[in-house]
Structures are given as structure tokens and as C-alpha cells.
Amino acid sequence: MEYDLYSYDLFDTVITRSTLNPEGIFAVMQSRFGELSELSEIAPELAGDFVYIRKNAEASARKKTSKEEITLNEIYAIIKRNYCLSDAETLCLIKLEEETEIFCSLPLQLRVDEILSRIKAGQRVVFISDMYLSHEVIRKMLDKISSDLSKIPLYLSSEIGYTKASGNLFNYVKTKEKVNFNRWIHYGDNFKSDYKIPNKFGITAKWLKQSEISGFFKYLNKAYYNSTFSLMLGCAQAAIKNSGDLSDNKLYRTGALCAGPVFSPFADWILRQSLKKGISHLYFIARDGFIIKRIADRIIEKFSINIKTSYIYSSRQAWDPKTKEQRELLALYGKQQIKPNVKSGFVDIWGTGGSLKHFCDLCNLDLGKITLFLYGTYFYQDDALGFERVIFAQHLKLNGHVEFLAKAPEGQCIGFKLEKNIVIPVCREQEKIEIEKFGFSQYLSGIGDFVNYWIIFKNRTLGQNNELYRLIDSLISKFLFFASEDELHYFLNFPDYPKSEKNLAVMRPLRIFKYKLKIFVSKIKFIEKSKILSIFRD
């Protein structure tokens, strides 16, 4: 059916934020206070607790007003009075919030494309939003996405004084646009304001239900309320909202919400350390290095960093040859892959560096020109290795668990062979087939989409006072002790070799982790069944 008017809600329908929720905007603002000379003398309690103060000021402004909607000026009038701000300080805060909202705005591309196609087809489109931001700020957000979007008529509750929630804004638009309710269709994410209310008027309403993220992520964000947590988790949420049919895919969500936030800062840290150390080539050791290399390559491309990267096949079995022929092949592979006499970095997730030492000695590599980058390791340094070893998160008690997120599409490398004078890796083919069947590409898509958003806000997510490490520690603790259905699916079903191992004492770490997860899940089921948790349900 063709309609005379197509109206769209704005936030979480056409535009989303790179923060997990609106309060995240206030956290990003607070992180910038030290950069602004105009705010150098504001009250310390305001500077240190701005997120809660800004949130409560909005609640107070809504209680005070007799209007259906408030404005940003009315919110800051309360903060100004309570914290003795000057006019200049108040104006600076208002401008900072507006700038932050524009900076953190992201398109919901599927909906944007739909609207642009309607405009091209000559259909009449308007935006209707319950929002305290001004017309000018919203226009800048839309113009950031497309100049065509910024030309669409915009009806804002903050300027008109009516809201969708009351229904009065729909009546106002009807009069202004001279349209009958039964010839009008509205799209939005709020079940009441965008679906129930317009339906009462006879407007055809389409509820665009958003894919929810785990409540634990929301808890983490609320518990800390800082820019690092909010932006990292918000970028994961934006990836999911923009993923279309993949938004409910368990592997995609685990990639976007877990692996992306855990590994992206590590890849960035490696590149920054490499530039300081004069390292020109990075070798990412299979298979843990596969995902890290993909992230690092994206950062290198985005910021035109002059560092080369390579993926080098390995495993404990492949790098511990037992025969003379195997040792010769490994040595040839090393000479074939590694540039001699060049400062080089090797990247792994977890370990001591012993396997790399064995590989370097066999290939006659200059240990003095080598740095090993590790995510984490046991809490000691082995000075006998002969090369530098630096660790991203040594102070975190990771116990190797982060390895479970670092997978690759190929089967384990079990050795090497010579083919047309080139040494090539020999990998378990059946394992590769099962990893593909499992849907590993969806997991990688989740990580990649997260990185594409995170990279925009990277410099705002590196954290202060160990915020970044607290986030990583919290995320790893989450999937160890509060694993969602998405994460359980990934950890319990990822193809694991060799399958014949029965004895827990000789199981690889992933199999031990699976065992522990199964025990944990059974305990939770027992607790639920015994109704021990019933006292918390009210």
C-alpha cells in the first residue's frame, strides 16, 4: 500500500549512539573536562561525578516543568544553580554535550538506506522525535550521515512542546502535514510511543524491535560509568544493531561483544609499542594470532601505519620437530618467512616464549632484534630466552582464558612439506571443515564490525587509571562465571581436537574450560530448581 506520509523516529531507529546508553554521553563529556580551560575551576564534585549529576538534573527538570518536554537549557539551569556555575561555564557544558552527541552519533544504515530510497522515489518522509536536543544539533547529526537526510522535515518535542508519548505530537504533525491518519505509516523502536500511541489514532505503526544485549553488559556500564566502558560496549551494540539478519546470531554476538572489545586494545597496543621500538615487521603466530592480525591490519590501513604484518604457521607439535628432515623443513620455513637483520615483533596470546626461542635458534635468527608481544603470561620473566618479551596485561589474572576467544579458520598446523621449492604448512583438513561448518565466519564478522566502529573512537577508549584493564578483566570474568547463551554456544561447541582425549588431566585448556562450564551450568540449574534464588525475584 502506498501512503501519503512516512514518518520515522530518530534515536535507535535512524541514528544510534556509540555509547551503550544516553548516560554514556555524559561519561565521555566528563573524560574531556581536563582538556577545556573554561572548566578548570568548576566544583570538584561536579567534575568527578558529572554522569550522576547530569542524569539527576534532567530528572529534576522533568518534575519541575508543566510542559510535556524539556530543553537542554532547562537541564543546565539546574546544574548552574546548584554548583554556582558562571554563564561561560554553563554555556561550555551545553556546547560540550551537543558536540559529544554529534561526535558519538552513528547511522543505522539499513534504515538510512530505506529512507533515502523513499526520497528518491518521491515519497514524503518526516522525522518525529521526543528529544531535548535542539533542531540545529539534530540537523548536524543527520548531515553527518547524508545531506539528503538533513533536509527532511523534523518535528522535535523540545521545540514544539508536545511528545509522541502523549499523542499530541502526532496530532500536531497531522495538522502541519495535512495528512489523514489512515494514509500515514510510522516507524520507531519504542513500543509505546512509536507503536501503541499511533495505532490508537489509526496510523499504521511498525515497531522496530531492537536486538537486546545481555543485562550483564548494562550492569558493567552502570557500575563504572566511564567513557571507556560506555564507548567499547556501545560500539559492540552499534555493530549488532547494524548487522541485520545476524543481530541474533550467537557467534556474531560473541565476536562483537566479547572478542572485539578484548582484542582490539591489544592490537592497538602492539602497534604503538612497535612504533616506539622501531619494529618494522610483525609476525602473528598461528593460531592465536589470526584474529589479532586482522584487527592490526585494519588499524594500519585506517591510520596509514608503516608496519608490515605476516601470519606464521606454528603449533607446539610443528615447532618441536623430532626428525632431521622435520628440523630442516622448519628451518627452511623460517628463512622463507622471516626477514633477516630487521627488528621484528612476534605476537602470541599466552605462553612463556619457549617455543619461539626453539624456532629462532633453529632458524639462526638474531635474538637481539626480536620482541615477543604477549597478551598475558605466567607471572615471571625468563631472562634466558635471549629476546625481549613484553606483556599487555600481566597484572590481570587471566590464567590463559583469553586464549579461548582467539581462534582461526584453519586446522592445527601439524608440520611442513616442500612443494615446488616452497615450504608450506600442513594443517588438519577435517578440523578446518568443521570450523567452517560451525560458522566461524559469523564470529569473525562480529569482530570486524565492532572494530569498524571502535576505530572511530579508539583514542577515547584507551582509558585512564586502568579503566581499559578493568573492562577487559570484567569481560573475561563475565564469560567465565556469567556466560550467556551466546557465549556458551561458542565455548561449548567450537570444534576441539583431538576428540579422543578422555582424561581431564591431559585435556587441552579448552576442554578443561568446557568441563568447568558444564559444572557451573549444572550448579545454576540446581540452584534455580531448589528455589534458593526466589528471595531475589521480587
Image (spheres, rainbow, N blue to C red):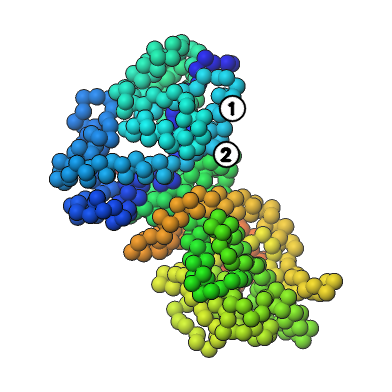
Residue 346 in the figure: left or right of residue 420: left
Q: Are marks 2 and 1 in contact (CB under 8 Å)?
A: no
Where is residue 171 shown, x and y percent of the image?
Answer: 37, 15
Q: Residue at x 52, y 46 (%)?
A: 239
| First in residue order: circle 2 vs circle 1 | 1
Q: Amino acid at mark 2?
A: Gly
The CA distance from mark 2 to mark 1 is: 18 Å
User: Mark 2, residues whose alpha carbon is within 10 Å: few (<14), some, or many (≥20)?
Assistant: few
Where is residue 386 shown, x and y percent of the image?
Answer: 55, 86
Q: Which residue is mark 1?
A: 117
Q: Amino acid at mark 1?
A: Ser
Residue 263 in the figure: left or right of residue 332: left
Residue sitting at the far right: 420
Q: Residue at x 32, y 22 (%)?
A: 160
- Which structural element holds mark 1? helix
Where is residue 244 shown, x and y percent of the image?
Answer: 57, 39
Q: Decide: is 494 above or below 330.
A: above
- Does residue 442 appear in this view? yes
Q: Residue at x 76, y 83 (%)?
A: 328
Residue 221 in the figure: left or right of residue 337: left
The label nearer to you, 2 versus 1, is 1
